[in-house]
Image (spheres, grey):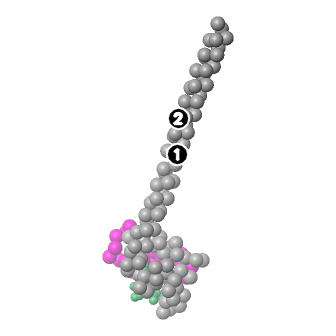
Amino acid sequence: MNSLKGALVLAATLLSITASLATLARQAPESKPASASSDDEHGQLLAKGKTIFVEKCAKCHNERGDKALSSGKPLSERGLSTETIARAVNGRLSKGTDEERRAVTFYIASLMKN
Ligand code: HEC
């Protein structure tokens, strides 16, 4: 009889361990959204920046910033720092919102080859 009771206790223990592992497994993906949603935000910002850039800047810079400029190298080959890009964007998009400028700056930074 004692060994049956022991077996039941063991079974119950195993069950509860399995249950907590299952809970952990279910929670694991939920601990990720922080990075997943910032990736998402990243992608949305880039997409938004691209839309504005294509609309307002691409006639001189091409969609990928690879059009040669009157003063020399295309944007994508200028190796511009984010600060330099932000300054130029602030001038060009002075009527836009902060978020629009941030998005375009981000997009241009993503075009830099060096
Ligand atoms: C009418 C043509 C034209 C349009 C439209 C235009 N640009 Fe430019 N952009 C230029 C030229 C030409 C240069 C190079 C000027 C220089 O070297 O000083 C330049 C340079 C830049 C630079 C680099 C500045 C540097 O320090 O090398 C950035 C960043 C830039 N433009 C962003 C933009 C953005 C953002 C837009 C749209 C909101 C835009 N441009 C629209 C012609 C244009």
Q: Give the range drawn in magenta.
A: 78-99
Name the foreground residue: 64 vs 2.
2
Residue under pointer 2: 23
The amino acid beneath tag 2 is: Thr
Circle nearer the N terminus (1, 2): 2
**Tag on residue 41?**
none
Q: Which residue is drawn at 55% across and 37% down?
A: 24
Q: Can residue 91 be seen in this view?
A: no
Identify the secondary structure beneath mark 1.
helix
Is 81 in the magenta?
A: yes
The amino acid beneath tag 1 is: Pro
Is 43 in the magenta?
A: no
- Quadrant location, the N terminus: top right
Identify the secondary structure beneath mark 2.
helix
Residue 2: x percent and y percent?
65, 8
On screen, residue 99 versus residue 39, left or right, reads: left
- Quadrant location, the C terminus: bottom right
Mark 1 Cα-neighbour bin, 10 Å: few <14, some 14–19, many ≥20 = few
- In this rendering, the answer to whether 10 lies above or below 73 is above
Mark 2 Cα-neighbour bin, 10 Å: few <14, some 14–19, many ≥20 = few
Dividing the image into four quarters, tell me where ligand 1 lies: bottom left
Q: Which residue is drawn at 55% across and 31% down?
A: 20
Residue 70: x percent and y percent?
48, 92
Residue under pointer 1: 29
Q: Is residue 2 visible?
A: yes
